[in-house]
Every structure is written in C-alpha cells, then in structure tokens.
Amino acid sequence: MDNKDIFPHIDHTLLRATSQRSEIDRLCEEALQYGTASVCIPAAYVSYARQKFPELNICTVIGFPLGYSTTAVKCFEAEDAVRNGADEIDMVINLCDVRNGEFDKVEAEIAAVKKSCGGKLLKVIIETCYLTQEEKIALCRCVTSAGADFIKTSTGFGTDGAKIEDIRLFKQHIGDGVRMKAAGGVKTKADLEMFLSEGCERIGTSSAVKLLLDGESNGGY
C-alpha cells in the first residue's frame, strides 16, 4: 500500500499532557505536508491551531482519557471545542455506566454529545481493553443508535490499544452509517495496512509520519 493512500486515513495525534506549542506546530505542519485526515490535539490548543492553520482539519478529545465526567461537562466540552474551531470530536464513554450495565445511559450520553457537536463529526472511544466481548457488542449498538459517526477502539492511555479482533467484531455489530477508528499501539506500516484492509476509515497515531517515511531520503511519499 502506497504511503499516499495511507496518510489520508491518519488522525495525526499528539495528546501528551506536556505537549508544547512547538510540537503542535510541527504536528500541524506535517499534517498539511502529507495530507493526513486531521490532527488530534488537546482542547487547550484548538483555538491556537485554528488561528495559525486555518485550512487544517482539527480534532480534539473530550472526557479524556477516563470518561467519567458527567454528561453535562462533556456536552460543554464539545460545545467549547467547536466554538474554538474543532472540526471533529473524539469522546470517551463513561465506563462506570458500562460496568453497571446501564447501556441506556451510555447511549443517551452519546446522543447528547452528538447534539452538542452542532453537526461536527463525533467519534466514540469505548476503550476496548477494559471490556468484555458482550460489552463491546452492546456498545456497538449504543454508538449506532445514538447517531455517532465513528466507533473508536482506544484512548492510547489505557492498558492496551487497538486489536484487529475488535475491528472485526465491530464490523459485525455496528450499523451501516458508523465508521471505525483504530487507535493506540499502531506502530508499524504493517499495522496501518492491516487496520485499513479490515475496513478502518481512520487510524489515530503519533508515529505515522516517522514510520512511513523511514528510510526515504526525499522527505516525500
């Protein structure tokens, strides 16, 4: 698979708590140079990036990384991020509700955040590393019924990241309008190709530019 066919599926990501402005600049510049789907950055940098890189597709995260802030807080975060210039929102579900078997609450929260996004793209992080098979299946239904645009495997801050088995499970249980994003632990070109070949529309990684250009002397595709 050619690099030029991979980059448009990458959410070029930097979510480290100590991220510096110079690192955000470099991330955004790389995203524009190589044509990634978006940059995924901390909410605190959205307004800055929007002003400095007006042509860029900007994604940010809410309820991140643990997901147990209240629905009202997540809705405010989403609205604030959109006001500041975010084009896409990646939200973390409330895993406490999942563990309590309250999937109706999970679905209602996703629907509320989707409304707060004001038409912007919503990706729902279910953090697969903490879930049983039955919980993953139930969450596929929640994401679909709530009208979200994507189901996403992981925050990258949990005990494990994306697994191909979970993507295959998603495919069996999400609705036709829901797309898939793999994130966390995607570290090789083979990983990227594998997830894309299984139907992922997006892959979240901080490593794409380095690993795809490794060994290329011209700095291009």
Image (cartoon, rainbow, N blue to C red):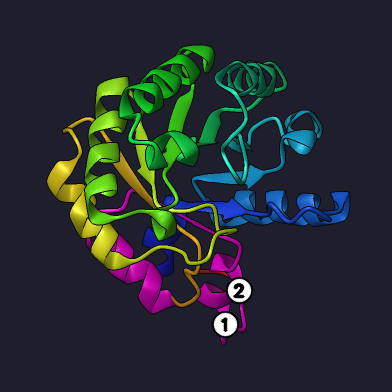
For the residues labelled 1 and 2, say whether their Cβ atoms are less than 8 Å apart. yes
Rendered residue at 65%/20% (across/down): 73
In front: 183, or 51? 183
Mark number, residue 145: none
Q: Residues within 10 Å of mark 2 (few under 14, many from 20)?
A: few
| Residue 128 sits above or below residue 87 on the image | below
Which amino acid type is marked by label 2?
Answer: Lys
Q: Is residue 205 magenta?
A: yes
| Residue 33 sits above or below residue 159 on the image | above
Identify the secondary structure beneath mark 1: loop
Identify the secondary structure beneath mark 2: helix
Residue hosting label 2: 210
Q: Position of residue 107 (x, y in %)?
A: 35, 24
The CA distance from mark 1 to mark 2 is 6 Å
Q: Position of residue 214 (x, y in %)?
A: 57, 82
Q: Position of residue 197 (x, y in %)?
A: 24, 63
Q: Is residue 203 magenta?
A: yes
Residues drawn in magenta: 189-218
Q: Is residue 79 left or right of residue 122?
A: right
| Residue 217 sits above or below residue 95 on the image | below
Quadrant in which residue 182 is drawn: bottom left
Observer able to see residue 209:
yes
Q: Is residue 95 left or right of residue 176?
A: right
Rendered residue at 28%/66% (across/down): 164
| Residue 141 sits above or below residue 166 on the image | above
Quadrant in which residue 40 is drawn: top right
